[in-house]
Amino acid sequence: MIRFYKTPWFTRLWYPDLVWSIQSQNSIYLTFDDGPIPKVTEWILDELKKVNARATFFCIGKNLEANTVIGKRIIEEGHQIGNHTYSHLNGWKTTTSNYLEDVRLGEEVIREQGVDSTLFRPPYGRIKRGQIKRFSKKLIMWSHLSWDFDSNLNVEKSISKLKCAKPGSILVFHDSERAFENLKLILPEILAHFQSKGFKFEAIS
Ligand SMILES: [Zn+2]
Protein backbone atom coordinates (compact mmCIF):
# COMPACT_ATOMS: atom_id res chain seq x y z
CA MET A 1 0.00 0.00 0.00
CA ILE A 2 2.77 2.39 0.96
CA ARG A 3 4.52 2.11 -2.40
CA PHE A 4 1.52 3.75 -4.05
CA TYR A 5 2.40 6.94 -2.25
CA LYS A 6 5.75 7.20 -3.96
CA THR A 7 5.16 9.65 -6.75
CA PRO A 8 7.87 9.01 -9.34
CA TRP A 9 10.17 11.98 -9.99
CA PHE A 10 9.15 12.10 -13.65
CA THR A 11 5.55 12.80 -12.68
CA ARG A 12 6.56 16.42 -12.15
CA LEU A 13 7.85 16.67 -15.70
CA TRP A 14 4.87 14.98 -17.25
CA TYR A 15 2.26 16.92 -15.38
CA PRO A 16 3.36 20.54 -15.14
CA ASP A 17 -0.20 21.71 -14.48
CA LEU A 18 -0.26 20.09 -11.07
CA VAL A 19 0.44 22.42 -8.13
CA TRP A 20 3.54 21.35 -6.14
CA SER A 21 4.07 24.57 -4.17
CA ILE A 22 2.51 28.01 -3.83
CA GLN A 23 3.95 31.46 -4.33
CA SER A 24 4.18 32.96 -0.83
CA GLN A 25 6.32 35.23 1.34
CA ASN A 26 5.85 33.58 4.72
CA SER A 27 3.14 30.93 4.65
CA ILE A 28 3.29 27.17 4.96
CA TYR A 29 0.42 25.10 3.62
CA LEU A 30 -0.54 22.11 5.75
CA THR A 31 -2.77 19.52 4.14
CA PHE A 32 -4.52 16.52 5.67
CA ASP A 33 -5.70 13.65 3.47
CA ASP A 34 -8.17 10.79 3.89
CA GLY A 35 -10.45 12.06 6.69
CA PRO A 36 -12.53 13.16 8.33
CA ILE A 37 -12.18 10.54 11.05
CA PRO A 38 -13.56 10.92 14.60
CA LYS A 39 -10.92 11.68 17.25
CA VAL A 40 -8.08 11.98 14.70
CA THR A 41 -9.46 14.95 12.73
CA GLU A 42 -10.84 16.47 15.92
CA TRP A 43 -7.42 16.27 17.55
CA ILE A 44 -5.86 17.95 14.51
CA LEU A 45 -8.45 20.74 14.65
CA ASP A 46 -7.64 21.30 18.33
CA GLU A 47 -3.92 21.49 17.60
CA LEU A 48 -4.44 23.91 14.71
CA LYS A 49 -6.65 26.11 16.85
CA LYS A 50 -3.98 26.42 19.55
CA VAL A 51 -1.68 28.27 17.13
CA ASN A 52 -4.38 29.90 15.01
CA ALA A 53 -3.38 27.82 11.99
CA ARG A 54 -5.48 27.22 8.90
CA ALA A 55 -5.12 24.10 6.78
CA THR A 56 -6.65 22.21 3.87
CA PHE A 57 -8.43 18.89 4.33
CA PHE A 58 -8.63 16.62 1.28
CA CYS A 59 -11.60 14.52 2.34
CA ILE A 60 -12.60 11.11 1.11
CA GLY A 61 -16.29 11.50 0.15
CA LYS A 62 -17.33 8.37 2.06
CA ASN A 63 -15.68 9.62 5.23
CA LEU A 64 -17.13 13.08 4.94
CA GLU A 65 -20.58 11.62 4.39
CA ALA A 66 -20.19 9.56 7.58
CA ASN A 67 -18.79 12.46 9.62
CA THR A 68 -20.66 15.57 8.57
CA VAL A 69 -20.43 17.14 12.03
CA ILE A 70 -16.64 17.10 11.82
CA GLY A 71 -16.91 18.41 8.25
CA LYS A 72 -18.91 21.36 9.55
CA ARG A 73 -16.33 22.02 12.20
CA ILE A 74 -13.54 22.05 9.58
CA ILE A 75 -15.41 24.72 7.63
CA GLU A 76 -16.52 26.78 10.63
CA GLU A 77 -12.96 26.99 11.90
CA GLY A 78 -11.77 28.57 8.67
CA HIS A 79 -10.12 25.61 6.95
CA GLN A 80 -10.57 24.56 3.35
CA ILE A 81 -12.03 21.30 2.12
CA GLY A 82 -10.79 19.65 -1.05
CA ASN A 83 -12.00 16.62 -2.97
CA HIS A 84 -9.97 13.37 -2.63
CA THR A 85 -12.50 11.22 -4.59
CA TYR A 86 -15.46 9.46 -3.01
CA SER A 87 -13.78 6.10 -2.46
CA HIS A 88 -10.04 6.80 -2.66
CA LEU A 89 -9.43 5.46 -6.15
CA ASN A 90 -6.03 4.97 -7.73
CA GLY A 91 -6.25 6.86 -11.04
CA TRP A 92 -3.70 4.62 -12.73
CA LYS A 93 -5.88 1.57 -12.09
CA THR A 94 -9.24 3.14 -12.93
CA THR A 95 -10.87 4.04 -16.23
CA THR A 96 -11.30 7.76 -16.78
CA SER A 97 -15.09 7.52 -16.75
CA ASN A 98 -15.17 5.57 -13.47
CA TYR A 99 -12.62 7.93 -11.97
CA LEU A 100 -14.54 11.06 -12.91
CA GLU A 101 -17.77 9.55 -11.61
CA ASP A 102 -16.12 8.92 -8.24
CA VAL A 103 -14.78 12.47 -8.21
CA ARG A 104 -18.29 13.74 -8.96
CA LEU A 105 -19.70 11.74 -6.04
CA GLY A 106 -17.05 13.23 -3.76
CA GLU A 107 -17.98 16.64 -5.07
CA GLU A 108 -21.63 16.09 -4.23
CA VAL A 109 -20.84 15.23 -0.61
CA ILE A 110 -18.74 18.38 -0.29
CA ARG A 111 -21.54 20.45 -1.80
CA GLU A 112 -23.97 19.03 0.73
CA GLN A 113 -21.75 20.72 3.31
CA GLY A 114 -22.42 24.02 1.59
CA VAL A 115 -18.96 24.25 0.06
CA ASP A 116 -18.07 24.69 -3.60
CA SER A 117 -14.49 23.49 -3.51
CA THR A 118 -12.05 24.26 -6.31
CA LEU A 119 -9.39 21.89 -4.99
CA PHE A 120 -8.65 18.28 -5.80
CA ARG A 121 -5.89 15.91 -4.76
CA PRO A 122 -5.57 12.53 -6.47
CA PRO A 123 -5.28 9.61 -4.02
CA TYR A 124 -1.74 8.14 -3.98
CA GLY A 125 -0.74 11.09 -6.19
CA ARG A 126 -1.67 8.88 -9.15
CA ILE A 127 -3.70 10.27 -11.99
CA LYS A 128 -3.59 9.77 -15.75
CA ARG A 129 -3.07 12.54 -18.26
CA GLY A 130 -6.52 11.83 -19.75
CA GLN A 131 -8.10 12.23 -16.31
CA ILE A 132 -6.27 15.50 -15.65
CA LYS A 133 -7.47 16.99 -18.94
CA ARG A 134 -11.07 16.65 -17.81
CA PHE A 135 -10.55 18.67 -14.64
CA SER A 136 -11.44 22.28 -14.15
CA LYS A 137 -10.17 22.21 -10.57
CA LYS A 138 -6.77 22.96 -9.14
CA LEU A 139 -4.87 19.71 -8.74
CA ILE A 140 -2.92 20.10 -5.54
CA MET A 141 0.10 17.86 -5.03
CA TRP A 142 2.80 18.51 -2.40
CA SER A 143 6.41 19.42 -1.78
CA HIS A 144 6.90 17.59 1.54
CA LEU A 145 5.37 14.26 2.50
CA SER A 146 5.43 13.36 6.22
CA TRP A 147 5.12 9.58 5.66
CA ASP A 148 2.99 9.62 8.81
CA PHE A 149 1.05 6.56 7.56
CA ASP A 150 4.20 4.41 7.71
CA SER A 151 4.16 2.32 10.91
CA ASN A 152 7.95 1.87 10.67
CA LEU A 153 8.59 5.57 10.30
CA ASN A 154 11.65 7.20 11.82
CA VAL A 155 9.71 10.08 13.35
CA GLU A 156 12.75 12.26 14.04
CA LYS A 157 13.85 11.96 10.43
CA SER A 158 10.37 12.84 9.20
CA ILE A 159 10.29 15.92 11.44
CA SER A 160 13.71 17.14 10.34
CA LYS A 161 12.77 16.78 6.67
CA LEU A 162 9.52 18.67 7.20
CA LYS A 163 11.43 21.43 8.96
CA CYS A 164 13.21 22.07 5.63
CA ALA A 165 9.94 23.45 4.25
CA LYS A 166 10.11 26.99 2.86
CA PRO A 167 7.46 29.67 2.30
CA GLY A 168 4.97 28.23 -0.15
CA SER A 169 5.70 24.59 0.67
CA ILE A 170 2.79 22.17 0.76
CA LEU A 171 3.07 19.55 3.52
CA VAL A 172 1.04 16.34 3.56
CA PHE A 173 -0.30 14.58 6.64
CA HIS A 174 -3.13 12.10 7.01
CA ASP A 175 -6.13 12.20 9.29
CA SER A 176 -6.40 8.44 9.46
CA GLU A 177 -6.23 5.88 12.28
CA ARG A 178 -3.14 4.45 10.66
CA ALA A 179 -1.23 7.73 10.81
CA PHE A 180 -2.43 8.94 14.19
CA GLU A 181 0.40 7.66 16.42
CA ASN A 182 3.03 9.31 14.22
CA LEU A 183 0.96 12.42 13.69
CA LYS A 184 0.66 13.01 17.45
CA LEU A 185 4.45 13.28 17.58
CA ILE A 186 5.03 15.13 14.32
CA LEU A 187 2.34 17.79 14.04
CA PRO A 188 2.87 19.68 17.35
CA GLU A 189 6.63 19.88 16.60
CA ILE A 190 6.03 21.23 13.12
CA LEU A 191 3.47 23.78 14.28
CA ALA A 192 5.78 25.01 17.07
CA HIS A 193 8.83 25.13 14.79
CA PHE A 194 7.30 27.25 12.04
CA GLN A 195 5.37 29.42 14.44
CA SER A 196 8.58 30.31 16.28
CA LYS A 197 10.08 31.31 12.90
CA GLY A 198 7.20 33.72 12.28
CA PHE A 199 5.50 31.69 9.56
CA LYS A 200 1.77 31.66 9.01
CA PHE A 201 -0.19 28.50 8.30
CA GLU A 202 -2.68 29.17 5.56
CA ALA A 203 -5.36 27.15 3.81
CA ILE A 204 -5.01 26.74 0.06
CA SER A 205 -7.55 28.82 -1.79
ZN1 LIG B 1 -5.33 9.60 0.25
Image (cartoon, helix red, strand yellow):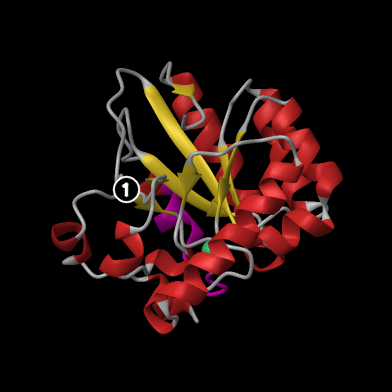
Question: As rendered, which of 96 and 18 lies closer to the eye?
Answer: 96
Q: In the image as oriented, which residue stretches furthest toward the right?
A: 69
Which percent across, then down, holds residue 10?
16, 67
Residue stretch in magenta: 150-159
Is 199 situated above or below 162? above
| Quadrant of ligand 1 in image | bottom right
Work out whether 135 lies above or below 19: below
Q: Nearer the viewer, residue 75 or 143?
A: 75
User: Where is residue 14 drawn, in percent x and y?
Assistant: 16, 62
Residue 153 magenta: yes
- Does residue 103 appear to the left or right of 49 in the view shown? left
Q: Position of residue 18 (x, y in %)?
A: 29, 50
Which kind of residue does numbered mark 1 sit on? Ser
Q: Identify which residue is drawn at 36% across, 49% down.
A: 142
Q: Position of residue 84 (x, y in %)?
A: 55, 57
Q: Is mark 1 within 8 Å of ligand 1?
A: no
